[in-house]
Amino acid sequence: MKKILTAVVLAIAATTSVSNALTREEIEKDPILKGKMLAKRCSWCHDINRTLIAPSFKEILKRYKDVPEETLKKQFADAIKNGSKGKWTNWMKEHIKARKIGSIEAMYMPPQRPYYNDKEIELIVKWLLSLRK
């Protein structure tokens, strides 16, 4: 009886998770979803809400809250494409335990140009700015 109950629970869980999954077509049709999926690589260093080894996306957006969206699109696209160094040094000194990862002054965001084309970067920026609202 215990084996049957376990099998039923697993079957329900599998069916539920499959039914909630997005299809590739749904992702391709929605630029925000596509940008979110492309930004998966960003999660190596950034999280939406938590500090990992870099500021969270919400923290980044908070810092630039008074910057107009069109200006921010260009700034974010440039930072993603070409990388960034030194903009977050003071913040990192306060929030990151440098002894575990090395010198904060040596830390930087590497260029993502090798991984993304301009259109993909545009979609990532669109998704990132959607978190602002």
Image: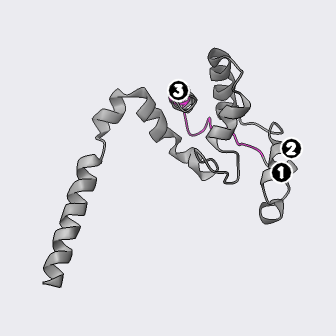
Question: Is label 2 or label 3 in front?
Answer: 2
Q: Which residue is mark 1?
A: 94
Q: Is residue 47 above or below residue 14?
A: above
Locate residue 131, reporting x and y percent. Answer: 54, 33
Residue type at tag 2:
Asn
Residue type at tag 1:
Glu
Magenta-colored span: 108-123
Locate residue 1, reporting x and y percent. Answer: 12, 84
Residue at position x 55%, y 35% in the image: 116
Q: Which residue is mark 2?
A: 90
Query: How crowded is the residue under tag 2: few (<14 C-alpha within 10 Å), some, or many (20+)?
Result: few
Q: CA distance from mark 1 to mark 2?
A: 7 Å
Q: Is residue 121 magenta?
A: yes
Horizontal arrangement in the rendering, residue 22 relative to residue 32 (left or right): left
Dots 3, 1 in contact, CB < 8 A: no
Locate residue 111, reporting x and y percent. Answer: 68, 38
Q: Which residue is mark 3?
A: 126
Q: Is residue 54 above or below residue 73?
A: below
Dots 1, 2 in contact, CB < 8 A: yes
Query: How crowded is the residue under tag 1: few (<14 C-alpha within 10 Å), some, or many (20+)?
Result: few
